Amino acid sequence: MMNKQGFDLWATAYDQDVIVSEEKDEYPFAGYQKNINGIYSEVMKQEKADVLDIGFGTGVLTTSLYEAGHRITGIDFSSEMITIARKKMPGAKLIEWDFAKGLPSIVKEETYNAVVSTYALHHLSDEGKVRMIEELLPLLKVGGKIFIGDVAFETREQLHACREPNLHHWDSDEFYFVADELEEALRGTCKVTFHKHSHCGGVFVIEK
């Protein structure tokens, strides 16, 4: 798993690497822009929403929301990515924090119309993802939703089918979403809907 130093070093090349992978329709970023656009469109149904971004990176999604007038709070553990994002969003509340440790108290003191996360939560174990979602649910305002765009598959079989031809660069330290397993783990806690946007990516919409 890439550590903080690794993400700091990757920060300046991250956006271009994503573009190359997406244009080739390859793992891991096939469907990336559809995921980003899908979440953006959903959040934009509201005006001046309070938005929390978990693992915002260089701010690809949240910069667009920030420029549209939404209030942005975000956490990320890469100081270099935060520096890049802060130049785009000088008025946003950007916090250096490792979300693998849970949420910082300053974030839990507020409530949000939307919680978003793109290509970040796959660094948590499957159990860790469930714990994170359970920690986020109480932070939603009435009608609020969680939107997660990431490397994701409908079933474990689809994940394995993607893994086999990509073994040469498959990251075995990452834990990719499997929709039917996540839905089962959260059954009775919240509603989970998965929108597939490529062979290895999609968006989860989670609501109370």
Image: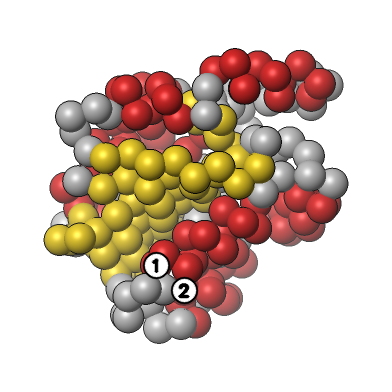
Task: State the image coordinates of residue 15 (x, y, percent, origin top left).
Answer: 72, 58
- The reply to whether residue 140 is in sight is yes
The residue that label 2 is drawn on is 65
Point 34% across, 56% down: residue: 115
- Sooner in the amino-acid sequence: mark 2 or mark 1: 1
- Local crowd at mark 2 within 10 Å, few (<14), some, or many (≥20)? many
- The reply to whether residue 97 is in sight is no
Q: Secondary structure at mark 2?
A: helix
The numbered disc on residue 53 is none
Display colour scheme: secondary structure
Task: State the image coordinates of residue 158 (x, y, percent, origin top left).
Answer: 62, 22
- Local crowd at mark 1 within 10 Å, few (<14), some, or many (≥20)? many
Point 45% across, 77% down: residue: 66
Q: Quadrant of residue 126?
A: top left
Tell whether 173 sits left or right of 194: right
Q: Amino acid at mark 1?
A: Val
Tell whether 39 sits left or right of 101: right
Q: Amino acid at mark 2?
A: Leu
Q: Quadrant of residue 202?
A: top right
The numbered disc on residue 43 is 1
- Label 2–label 1 contact, CB within 8 A: yes
Q: Quadrant of residue 129?
A: top left
In front here: 124 or 82?
124
Point 29% across, 70% down: residue: 50
Task: State the image coordinates of residue 13 (x, y, percent, origin top left).
Answer: 77, 55
The answer to whether residue 119 is above or below residue 134 is below
Point 57% across, 53% down: residue: 35
Circle nearer the viewer, 2 or 1 = 1
The answer to whether residue 208 is above or below residue 124 is below
